């Protein structure tokens, strides 16, 4: 990945190729800034979107920076940010459905609603244990042909994203 990054950063001229060879020979001494690597990851993401004609994802990627600043503000605690991310993607051992899938044991259903699977969509939109004003405001984002994560990330209303952040602090307990 480092050589690909250097090729992207320096272009494809002969001088750039020689620089890449020189730097790659000193690979263990080379350091890359976080900003450089995040710019490169953004470049790879945009390249992927362009190659696969993902217009909906492209529109979401444009506003993703603003969405991420709302969901995970700069002055937030790590514990709260972890809860937000866990509720967003649903792959956390606090969800019994995920735990049952990973450990191949146990009941994947919710302890409050024994007939329904305990996953992030269930906690956000259905489970009466987590019913609150935050969830009532998010209920219209429950779209069955999209994952919960894409539904939340596709929302450009910062007030609703803050509601999701508040719900995450209630729905995820460590």
Image (spheres, helix red, strand yellow):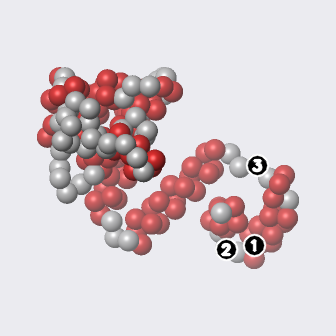
Q: Position of residue 101 (x, y in %)?
A: 39, 50
Residue 5 horizontal/vertical position (percent): 65, 62
Horizontal and vertical percent position of residue 38 = 57, 49
Q: Quadrant of residue 11?
A: bottom right
Classify residue 5 as left or right of residue 134: right
Q: Residues within 10 Å of mark 2 (few under 14, many from 20)?
A: few
Q: Nearer the viewer, mark 2 or mark 3?
A: 3
Name the disc covering residue 31, or none. Answer: 3
Contact between marks 2 and 3 (CB within 8 A): the answer is no
Q: Marks 3/1: CA distance?
A: 18 Å
Which residue matches tag 1? 17
**Mark 2 sits on what residue?**
12
For image coordinates 75% across by 72% down, the residue present is 17
| Residue lying at 38% horizontally and 71% vertically, measured from the top left | 52
Tell which circle, 2 or 3, labels the residue nearer the N-terminal end: 2
Q: Position of residue 57 (x, y in %)?
A: 33, 58
Are circles 1 and 2 on residues that touch, CB within 8 Å?
A: yes
Mark closer to the chain start, 1 or 2: 2
Crowd class of label 3 (few under 14; some 14 to 19; many from 20; radius 10 Å)? few
Secondary structure at badge 2 equals: loop
- Mark 1–mark 2 Cα distance, whole angstroms, equals 7 Å
Q: Callout 1: helix, strand or loop?
A: helix
- 115 vs 50, left or right, is left
Per the rendering, the mark at residue 4 is none
């Amino acid at each position: 990945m480092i050589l690909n990054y250097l090729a992207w950063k320096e272009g494809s001229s002969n001088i750039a190729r020689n620089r890449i060879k020189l730097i790659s020979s000193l690979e263990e001494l080379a350091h890359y800034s976080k900003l450089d690597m995040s710019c490169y990851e953004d470049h790879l993401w945009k390249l992927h979107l362009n190659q696969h004609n993902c217009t909906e994802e492209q529109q979401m990627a444009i506003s993703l920076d603003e969405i991420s600043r709302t969901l995970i503000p700069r002055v937030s605690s790590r514990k709260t940010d972890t809860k937000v991310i866990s509720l967003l993607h649903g792959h956390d051992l606090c969800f019994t459905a995920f735990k049952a899938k990973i450990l191949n044991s146990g009941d994947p259903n919710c302890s409050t609603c024994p007939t329904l699977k305990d996953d992030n969509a269930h906690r956000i939109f259905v489970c009466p244990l987590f019913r609150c004003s935050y969830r009532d405001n998010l209920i219209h984002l429950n779209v069955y042909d999209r994952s919960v994560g894409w539904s939340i990330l596709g929302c450009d209303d910062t007030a609703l994203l803050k509601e999701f952040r508040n719900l995450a602090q209630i729905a995820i307990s460590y």
